Image (tube, rainbow, N blue to C red):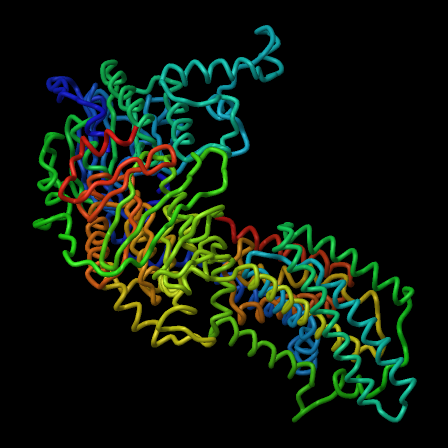
Amino acid sequence: MSAAQTNTDRPRPAMLWLSENRQILALPVMFVVALLVFAAAAPNFLSTDNLTNVARQSVYLLIVALGQLIVMITGGLDLSVGSNVSLTSVVSAMVMATVFAGNPDAPWLALWSGLVAGMAIGIAVGLVNGLGVTLLRIHPFMMTLGMSSIVFGLTLFISGGVPIYGIPPLHGEIFGFGRIFGLPIPAIVALFLVVLAYATLQWTRFGRHLYATGGNNRAAALSGVRTDRVTVVAYMMCGLLAALSGLLLTARLGTGEANIGGTLPLESIAACVISGVSLAGGRGRTLMVVLGTLLIVLVQNGLNLMQVGAYAQFVATGAILIFAMALARN
Amino acid sequence: MMSHAVARTQQAAPSAAVPTLSTVGLTKRYGQHAALDSVSLDFLPGEVHVLFGENGAGKSTLISMIAGANTPTEGRVLMDGREVALGSVSAARAHGVRAVFQEFSLIPWMTVAENITLGEEPLAGPAPLQRVVGFLSKSGATAEARRLIDDLGFELDPRATVASLTRGKQQMVEICKAMRVRPRVLILDEPTASLSEHDARALFRLIRRLQDQGTAIIYVTHRMHEIPLIGNRLSVLRDGRFIATVPADTHEDRLIELMTGRNMEKVYPRPRADLGDVRLELRGVSLDHKPGVPDIEGIDLAVRAGEIVGIAGLVGCGKSNLAQACFGLRRIVSGEVLVDGVPLVPRHPADAIGRGLWYLPSDRKNDGLALELTAHENMILSGLRFGASRGEMLKPRREARQLSQVSRMVEFDGRRLGEPVARFSGGNQQKILLAKSLVQDVKVYVFDEPTVGVDIGACLAIYRCLADLSARGAAILLVSSNLPELMGLTHRMLVMSGGDIVAEFDRADYDEHRILEQFF
């Protein structure tokens, strides 16, 4: 026991609890502050239309952030989510376009082949990340940074750097702009994934193993947890979630794009970190990440409405990330 | 462990002297709760003053305030009878107060010499140049570190990187750092917890030399057998309050009563008499070579149901490696491990646990517990696959039921299951680690140093739990560096030295001196 920290065997007073959890408390506070500031600065900020817009824009980042959360709980990091989204978009669009061109009467066939191909790509990228981190013992930062470059290179190579046209309109009609009971389908998908992630992390053994692997890898292994398998599956889940986000974005845009993923690694990591997800692993809550994602999109949206310009968004996202890290320090 | 080694006559501390350091009504409050409540103690020149108490009794708070790492809420500190302000570690150092804490302040990727000279580095070149540019003198640092190391009688290479050293060696580096400036008050917080016998003896010789030079030494330890060897007086703290100051040769039982406030019938439960079939067997087990560990070859041993078999020996004799080999953590090149007569070849700890074998690691912070997770999450972990709470979906109610039962077995406060492990004292963390062993269907236990660095209260709880397991028919292999503990708990004891089993004793033949002779 160090001198400064006296871990006595008694419950601590409330003030200490506040200071220990300041990182968790910071997010709702920042959220409310952002709401107030933008409501005052941009009159149409609180309009139903705009808030719906924020929710719809959040979907793509949110899904990627859920994957990032799962990997970060194991003590890892995935910098390749952006390239993964791009590759998924390009590959799924090419598969859809090719199948659709051959069978113009069967848009469903084209749709399904594209979706399956996209998800397979995402999972495969995650698998390679996971194997590199576990079998080769490469630090997640370097492994996924390297993969990010490889995957982006592949994307450009495959697409030639131009948008992929020719996907069936059905894709956009359903997954881009479709609604069920008035709710946008992308939002329903995201909601479903949030519930799924929450249930997996809180209610299943696999979820507990994720936390244990990140909390203390060696202790978990000695307790019979197959930590390497858990880690690989975590990266695969992250890859799948990135792919789903890529598929939804493709549906929205109507084309396969190589350049849609660029800011996602930073934004998804920021969304997790401001939500109290520990870079060291073992900590992180689904619903906080939802809130963290909304905050980032809210700030970007608010700055847009204030007509500060798109470039300020990068400054804001980075500043939020650094501020959150400052709060997280011990 | 070292009672034979250091035959020591009780030195009376100079009694009439002015205390080098006194605390007057020292108090530390955290909100409503007083971690230390008006403690007044005198530390005399040339005295080894032992602080004794359970974890959370206030020892750490007291020494951290004397060392300047923590500021008191109330009370004063006097040195030579005059009030001093020890508001920071550097202020305390300026007054000649030095501390060696259990958590080290070493920089892992620097060498021993660089660590020892950190802050006051020897410089190269002529003196005028040194004032302008501080070029480091590597040879100067190495020479100074070597001088200090030789002076203290440690076995340390000043050029070694600290990260490559064992914990025991790192402890020595830490002590060297504190000794660089002759301290007037030296605080040692469980200094022998990770030292080998040899190094502990070197430390004791050093402490005695400092005593002769008039240094006041504040010595925190949980190891009762050390107290009469090294101490002059002993002060007991309990729940943040001062209980008593007694001579260091006061009987152990009396000390435990003072510390716990409970009347103590017996420290060690009696082992059960009837034994069952052989559950764990090692046949001619040899491990692959590993640098720094003696080669282990051709080991045979067997543990029966209900039996507790001890493995004794010095730190580094290979006993921990043998324990790990049972669990598949060291590669076995020949021979076999059998559980209930069937060979076990674990590729992963999960295989061993699935066959009913459990290993409790000695390093609870690195190998045992996830400190950020709660006590509940840590305890139940392996039970999610191998215990009553198994299943793909978590079963919160069943987990809670099982853990309240397990908490009772290890005498852990079940109301605190939801708190993160990092918040608990060493004793409670060790109980949580032990509780992890009890949530799955296991009949063979390998315990590696189950009571290392914990207070006596937790020790007793752990002893009772081991006896309880044995009474229920578990086979237990107990690796320990604490000989009295092995003698108290086990049916049989094997002594390891240099990687071999050099002797075996039955309980009826236990004799501390004869066993210790086999250590070397």
Q: Nearer the viewer, residue B506 or A149?
A: B506
> Quarter of the image holding residue A135?
bottom right
Residue at (89, 67) in percent of width and height = A159
Residue at (62% x, 56% y) in the render? A321
Q: Is residue B411 above or below residue A304?
A: above
Where does residue A3 sit, x and y in percent of width and height?
A: 35, 39
The quarter of the picture where the N terminus of chain B appears is: top left
* Drawn side of residue A96 relative to residue B295, left or right: right
Is B137 situated left or right of B376 in this image? Answer: right
- Judge whether B218 appears above or below B121 on screen: below
Q: Is residue A162 above or below residue B244?
A: below
Residue B406 placement (x, y as % from top left): 27, 65
Q: Which part of the image, by quadrant, shows the C terminus of chain B?
A: top left
The residue that appears at 14% across and 52% down in the rendered structure is: B269
Q: Nearer the viewer, residue B214 or B305?
A: B305
Q: Is residue B329 left or right of residue A152?
A: left
Rendering quarter of residue A20: bottom left
Q: Residue at x 39, y 61 (%)?
A: B342
Q: Looking at the image, can residue A12 be seen?
A: no
Using the rendered image of the protein, determine whether residue B414 is visible from the camera's viewpoint.
Answer: yes
Expressed as whole percent of the image width and height from the top left, the position of residue B329 reads 46, 50
B82 lies above or below B225: above
Q: Position of residue B353 (x, y in %)?
A: 41, 62
Occupied quadrant, residue A157:
bottom right
Position of A76 compared to B420: left or right?
A: right
